[in-house]
Amino acid sequence: MSSLDESLSEHLKATAEIRDRREKMEFSEISPGVVARAKCGDEEAFHLIFNRYGRPVLSFINHHVRNRELAEELAQETFVRAYRNLGGLKDDLRLSTWLFGIARNVVRESVRQARRNEKKVGLDEPESLKLESGFVLPEGNMLDRELTETIHRALAELDDDKRIVFSLKIFHEKSYEEISSITGHSIGKLKTDLHRARAEMRKRIEPYLSTQ
Amino acid sequence: MNCEHCQLELEDFLYGELTERAAAEVRQHLATCTACVAERARLESENSLFAEFYEQTAIEPAAESWNAIRARIATEPVLAGQQEKAVWWRTMFGWLLVPSLARQVAFALMLVAVSVIATLWVMRRDDGNRLAEVKPTPTEMPQTIAPEPVPAPKNELANVRTGKPKPQLKGETLKIRQLSESEVLAQQLARTEREYQNTIKLLERAIAKRRDSFAPEAVKKYESSLALIDSSIVQSKRALTQQPDDLAARQFLLAAYAKKVELMQVIAMQ
């Protein structure tokens, strides 16, 4: 076996381990029993679900609306709808995918409503590219802050479909099958959107990569 | 595998989304191509950067978030019965929720809606005329006629079921009562259903004439799809018999008819 093969095998193994760890972590924290209890209206069980998925769901929403206050509001709406419709969740092991699906719908409705109200909250409008007051950039040196802002802006300039697939695949490491369940799009479209999104993001971050 | 193909597959390769065979091809190509190895390194470094970005910008829900959710769900208890119903419908009619189908069904329903509006308009106009002329057709709108002649049938429904026209008394004054919402809906449904059934009959004749010219495989697929749709129609009708006011069942019934017409049109036009 060549050294390249060895390095690739190691990479694949490491990737598989990370996935396994993530899955185990997910299942150890939210067992199907907890979901079943939540389905029966057990508030404590639902609180566990919120504790486990509050951060990824809120972050997913915030990367789309870029307004902390609005993101909090939409995340709350997501969890309320989830609680109401838990009975509709067929496969308890796909809770995360299901929650992201609800979050995506909530975001879309909010963006549509905002467009209707001409408040320009939607990310496609240039006005929305301005950082909202509620969004706080992490502490760090100027390059980090600038790079973070560049990625935020680049993300905001993607169209909705591309941004969603990019976010779910790159940030949340969902499989195409899961993203397809969340968005309703075919895997072929998702691959094309991801490829284009990657190319657009690359253009924006390229200068930073070469200087690092 | 060439470089262009390899670079298209690289991202999926890194995420373990390729089949074993495709992954083996990528691995084989990477073993001999420095350009693609460089591309892989580039992707990995971008992914590291994005991962770092995510970790830096991911936010935790505010402390009061759970309290706000809790307050809302406290007033909205889980409606177990409603959820079971939703699951039942999803199982039975999940195929109607596939986005492309949903769009087609929505279009068909839009056509139905136009038809229903036109029907209602005509019916209301007819009602106006009848008030003036007092020339009712009992089988057409039996439920709108209140007083019964002598000898009166035991009930209105019996008359409708037997299909016998009601005897008309000389000088009888007919009163038209306001239809309830559910009665209007039931009328709309019946009329729309009839329209679909008529269209289906025409399409059946057209398909029967050309049946021998279709490929056996196409006929097989057509028949299995048709059986699925027919089963949905039967289920919806059964649900409506049990719960005549079930709006979801009505919608699914019309959607199933729309789908059937659409499928038959595709076959008939081949």
Image (tube, helix red, strand yellow):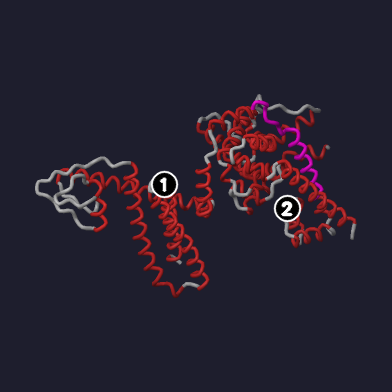
Q: Which residue is mark 1?
A: B246
Front residue of A137 and B261: B261
Residue B199 lies, in percent from the top left, at 36, 60
Residue at the location (72% across, 41% down)? Answer: A29
In front: label 1 or label 2 = 1
Residue A140 visible in the current orientation = yes
The correct choice, above or below, for B78 with respect to A93 in the image is: above
* Depth check, front residue: B6 or B156: B156
Boundaries of the magenta span:
B40-64
Mark pair 1, 2: CA separation: 46 Å
Chain of residue at mark 2: B
Q: Chain of mark 1?
A: B
Q: Label 2 sits on what residue type?
A: Asp
Looking at the rendered image, the quarter that the N terminus of chain B falls into is: bottom right
Disc 2 crowd, CA 10 A, few/some/many (<14, 14-19, 20+): some
Q: How many marks?
A: 2
Q: Main secondary structure of the magenta part?
A: helix
Residue shown at 34%/56% (left/top)?
B195
- Residue B12 tag number: 2
**Does B59 appear in magenta?**
yes
Q: Callout 2: helix, strand or loop?
A: helix
Q: Do badges 1 and 2 share one subunit?
A: yes
User: Which of the two discs, 1 and 2, labels the residue nearer the N terminus?
Assistant: 2
Q: Nearer the viewer, residue A20 or B112?
A: A20
| Residue type indicated by callout 1 | Asp
Considering every residue shown, the one lying at the far top of the view is A133
